[in-house]
Image (tube, rainbow, N blue to C red):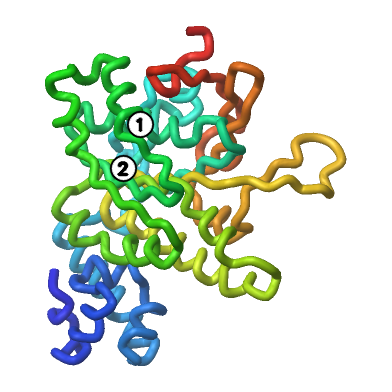
């Protein structure tokens, strides 16, 4: 998996790559040719060949799916993907039975609609079956006590072993976008070791909104967002995991009729997401709406927030 097996990567180039957290060929693929070119100073063709050859090595080793599958092979592959569900009937139906690996899910909505509780519910279900979860907390809202409560309420753990279940979570707190990007950039060694089922970035997009103020910083902000989205999209594919990120919203004053709420981040965030789901309040109930999906219909699902996390609305 070392980078020096690639043609043209000598000791000096390897040192440059490692200084920026690129330690293996998986990192080469995740970071992409453009970033590798900027780090090493090589020409575009050389950087492209490193990424292409790294991907072929990973395909031959069976670390990632083959990119030249036939349509029927790809259909069978997608059908057999492991799904992780909330055990809330309507919400799981919205996702076709659950969330799949090799996908990026954007969950957006106003405060109190259940975005973090959705992530906690999925985390509880994942660690209950022995899977590892990486949680990147961008808003300092992660509470292990709440996760333990969900585990106990769902009878996924007992008082005696609930702390052992929590040990399956690798937690990072990133108070600013620089630490967020640094953490995402350095995940590969940890992910190869832990093989997490879920990677959650709670509140990531909001950090860029808070730090890059005014129209003068718009281009720089969108460039950084594009880099983040490229990385997490590649992480989901190359490490065969589900990536979920929560997003804030803003009100569009130009909308005269209908719901004026829309997610922040613009088209860069929208196009990078495999699935986009809108959470909103509706009295005591909450509504999850599938806004964008390559396979699911656009419909709503009702749920409530209880001690068990995301639960059926009729409970």
The quarter holding residue 120 reads top left
In the picture shown, does residue 272 fall above or below 287? below
Q: Nearer the viewer, residue 114 or 267?
A: 114
> Is mark 2 in CB contact (under 8 Å) with mark 1?
yes
Q: Is residue 293 visible?
A: no
Q: Residue at x 31, y 39 (%)?
A: 76
Q: Is residue 132 visible?
A: yes
Question: Which residue is denoted by mark 2 in the rendering?
Answer: 198
Q: Residue at x 33, y 83 (%)?
A: 47
Give the percent coordinates (x, y) of residue 130. Answer: 17, 32
Q: Give the class, few, some or many, for how many residues have Cα within 10 Å of label 1's Cα (few <14, many ≥20).
A: many
Give the percent coordinates (x, y) of residue 257. Answer: 84, 36
In the picture shown, does residue 2 fall above or below 247? below
User: Mark 2 to mark 1: distance in Å?
Assistant: 8 Å
In the image: residue 32, left or right of residue 213? left
Give the percent coordinates (x, y) of residue 81. Answer: 30, 37
Q: Earlier in the sequence, mark 2 or mark 1?
A: 1
Mark drawn on residue 147: none
Q: Give the class, few, some or many, for how many residues have Cα within 10 Å of label 2's Cα (few <14, many ≥20).
A: many
Check the picture and name the quadrant holding the N terminus.
bottom left
In the image: residue 282, left or right of residue 162? right
Question: Which residue is denoted by mark 1 in the rendering?
Answer: 122
Q: Residue at x 21, y 54 (%)?
A: 191
């Amino acid at each position: 998996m070392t980078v020096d097996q690639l043609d043209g990567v000598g000791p000096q180039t390897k040192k440059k790559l490692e200084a920026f957290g690129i330690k293996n060929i998986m990192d080469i693929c995740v970071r992409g040719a453009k970033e590798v070119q900027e780090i090493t100073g090589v020409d575009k063709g050389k950087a492209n060949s490193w990424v292409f050859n790294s991907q072929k090595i990973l395909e031959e080793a069976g670390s990632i799916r083959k990119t030249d599958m036939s349509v029927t092979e790809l259909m069978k592959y997608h059908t057999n993907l492991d799904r992780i569900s909330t055990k809330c009937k309507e919400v799981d139906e919205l996702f076709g039975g659950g969330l799949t690996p090799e996908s990026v899910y954007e969950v957006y909505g106003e405060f109190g609609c259940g975005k973090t509780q959705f992530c906690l519910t999925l985390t509880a279900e994942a660690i209950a079956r022995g899977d590892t979860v990486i949680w990147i907390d961008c808003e300092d809202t992660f509470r292990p006590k709440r996760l333990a409560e969900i585990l106990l309420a769902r009878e996924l753990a007992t008082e005696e072993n609930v702390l052992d279940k929590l040990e399956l979570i690798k937690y990072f707190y990133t108070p600013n976008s620089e630490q967020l990007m640094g953490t995402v950039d350095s995940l590969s060694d940890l992910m190869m070791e832990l093989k997490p089922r879920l990677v959650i970035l709670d509140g990531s997009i909001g950090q860029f909104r808070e730090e890059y103020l005014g129209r003068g910083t718009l281009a720089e902000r969108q460039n950084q967002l594009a880099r983040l989205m490229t990385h997490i999209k590649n992480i989901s594919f190359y490490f065969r995991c589900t990536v979920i990120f929560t997003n804030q919203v803003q009100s569009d004053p130009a909308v005269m009729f209908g719901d004026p709420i829309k997610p922040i981040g613009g088209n860069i965030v929208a196009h990078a997401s495999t699935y986009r789901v809108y959470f909103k309040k509706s009295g005591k109930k909450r509504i999850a709406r599938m806004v964008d999906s390559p396979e699911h219909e656009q419909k709503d699902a009702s749920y409530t927030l209880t001690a068990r996390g995301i639960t059926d609305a009729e409970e």
